[in-house]
Image (cartoon, rainbow, N blue to C red):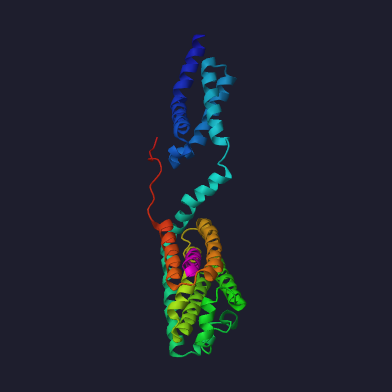
Amino acid sequence: MAPLQLKSQKFREEREEDWRRLSFLLDKVEGGGAKSLTDVQLMAVPVLYRSALSSLSVARATSLDQSLVEYLEGLCARAYFLVYGARARLGERILRFFTHGWPAAVRSIWKETLAAALIVGLSVVVGYVLVRQNPDWYYAIVGSDMASGRDPTASAEFLRKSLYDGGKDQSLAMFAAFLFNNNARVALFAFALGFAFALPTALLLIQNGAGMGAMIAVFAAKDLGWQFGGWLFIHGTTELFAIIIAGGAGFRIGLAVAFPGDRTRLDAAATAGRQTGAAMAGVVLMLLIAGLLEGFGRQLITSDLARYGVGAAAAALWLSYFYLPRREGARRERV
C-alpha cells in the first residue's frame, strides 16, 4: 500500500494546481454566472476541463486513491455542465445583441462612419448648390422615377400639396415607397460593394446625398425648403443614419482589402465582414423603423415643428444608443 500511496501523492502534487484553478473558476460561475469570468478565464475552462478528464482517466486506470477518483469525477461533472451545458436561450441572445453586440459593432467603425457622414453631407451641399445655380442639373442628378413630377417645373401648390395631403395623394405614397426602397438598396449595396476598395460605396453615398440636396433645392426655390425639410426629417434621420452606418461598414471592408497587412485580401475581407455583420443586421432594423416613421408619420403628423421634433428625437436616441459610454460588467480579473 505504501508505494501506491506515494504514487497517488506524487500524482496529486503534479496536477493539483490545475484542479484547484478549475474548481475556483467553477465556484465563480456558480456564484455569479459566466459573466463573472474574464475572457481569459472563459478560454481556460475547456483546457482545464480536458486536463482534469485526463487525470481522471489515469487515476481510474492505475487504481489510485478512491477518494481522489471521486474528487475528480465531481470536478469533471461540474465542468461538463459549464462547457457543454445549456446555451443561452434565444431571448437572451437577442437581448445581448441589442444591449451590447449592435452598439459595440457600430462603435468599432466610428472612423469609417464619420467619413461616410462627411461624404453624404458634402454631397447634399453640392447637389443643392448646383441645382440652385442651374436647375438643369436636377435632371442629371435625380432620376425621373425618384422625381415623380417634383422637379424645377412643378408649381408651388403641387409641391405643397405633396407635403400636407395626409396620405390621400397616392402619387406621394408611391414616391415615399420609392424613397424607402431606394435608400434600403443604397444601404445594402454600400456595404456589399465595399470589397471593391470602397469606391462603389463612396459613389453610392455621393449619388444619394446629391439627390437629396437637389430635391431640397427644388422645394427651397418655391419657398418650401423648411416644410420639405420637416417632411424629410421625420424619417430621414433614421434612414440616412442607416445608410451612413452601412457606408462605414463598406469602408471597413474596402480598407481591409486595400491594406490587408500580412493576411491575404480574402482573409482580410472575411474578417472585416464578420466584424461589421452585427452593424448591418441592425441597419436592416433601422430601415424598417424608418419605413414605419415614413408611412405613419407622413400621414398623421402635418405640423412642421412636430416633424422636426420627431426627427430630432430619433437622431438623439440613435446617437445616445450607439455612442454613449456604457458601464462595464463585472470587474475583470485574472486567475
Q: Main secondary structure of the magenta part?
A: helix
Q: Quadrant of residue 176?
A: bottom right
- Quarter of the picture containing the C terminus is top left
Is residue 154 on the magenta stretch? no
Decide whether residue 247 is among the magenta residues: yes
Front one among 47 and 111: 111
Q: Position of residue 203 (x, y in %)?
A: 51, 75
Q: In the image, 85: left or right of 15?
A: right
Q: Tally the marks.
A: 0
Considering only vertical position in the picture, is 164 above or below 247?
Answer: below
Q: Position of residue 56 (x, y in %)?
A: 55, 24
Q: Which residues are magenta?
A: 234-249
In this view, the residue in front, 116 or 235, is: 235
Q: Nearer the viewer, residue 200 or 215?
A: 215
Give x and y (percent) for residue 324.
38, 55
In the visual, does 326 lie left or right of 293?
A: left
Can the viewer see residue 119? no
**Is residue 129 in view from this perspective?**
yes
Tell me residue 96's x, y (percent): 50, 48
In the shown orientation, is residue 125 left or right of residue 4? Answer: left
Residue at 46% across / 17% down in the picture? 9
Residue at 47% x, 58% y is 262
